[in-house]
Amino acid sequence: MDKRTVIYYQDELNDEFSTFETTPPKIDGSYDYERRSFSKRLSRFVLYRIVMYPIVVFYGRVIFGQKIIGREKLKQYKKKGYFLYGNHTQPFGDATLQTRLPWPTSTYIIVHPNNLNVPVLGKWTPSLGGLPLPDGMSAYKNFLAAIKNRILEGHPVVIYPEAHIWPYYTKIRPFPDTSFRYPVEIGVPSFCFVNTYHKRKIRKRPKMITYIDGPYFPSEEARDLHEKMKSLRDQVHDRMVELSRNSDVEVIRYMRKEAAHG
């Protein structure tokens, strides 16, 4: 568990508090987002379903005592693609625990290229469904095509719109509507999930309760792409804020620098 008790922040949109630092690899037009070869498809099956998932279940149930509420809301889209938006509060947990939400349907997840450099797990990231953010237009076209193809194949795509990790943060930070372009353009539903933290009688590490809600669609009154993106973003953000209020313990206190030293 993160041993920091107070973290001072200045910029809710851009401050990053992950303890892992590295130089991200460049994702250019040669990056293989589709991974269609037999060896890569086999690698995904073995790592995702046989190796990683039992670890994820242990990590969720034993380490966090994770309870999932609202999973039934995803079942009506069991064989259809959709987007899942969550709060970003666990370096390892966010990369892995999201696989439990729609199981046995496998997920794909949009990640920062830094994830490819994480010891051990970084090499597994592509096989586990990680879609690293691209550099340049040639890679961006392939990135968008891969997202659309995964959705059309019936896979959920997971996005952490806050983008930066704030360990054990119990509120929802403001985030832009940029990532809501995908569901608007593809025409599929969006769901949100919020990991909340709760006191335990004996253990210091809090219990995690994950709330799922949705589906959400752009307002019918929205006239163009940007209005639809904003409409969808506002619905998801506001609901995540409501769900985040279920947390009842603050492991790390976050203080704005001006307030702390003013």
Image: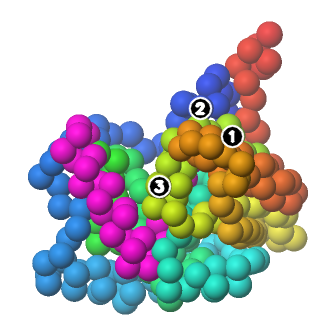
What segment is highlighted magenta in the picture?
135-162
Residues packed near mark 2 inside 10 Å, few (<14), some (14 to 19) or many (20 plus) = few
- Which structural element holds mark 3? helix
At 30% across and 63% down in the image, what residue appears? 146
Provide the residue designation for mark 2.
13
Residue 55 visible in the current orientation: no
The image position of residue 46, as x and y in percent, is 29, 86
Rendering quarter of residue 254: top right
Rendering quarter of residue 149: bottom left
At 77% across and 61% down in the image, what residue appears? 197
The image position of residue 42, as x and y in percent, is 22, 85
- Which structural element holds mark 2? loop
227 in relation to 261, above or below: below
Q: How is the image coloured?
A: rainbow
Residues packed near mark 1 inside 10 Å, few (<14), some (14 to 19) or many (20 plus) = some
At 38% across and 79% down in the image, what residue appears? 153
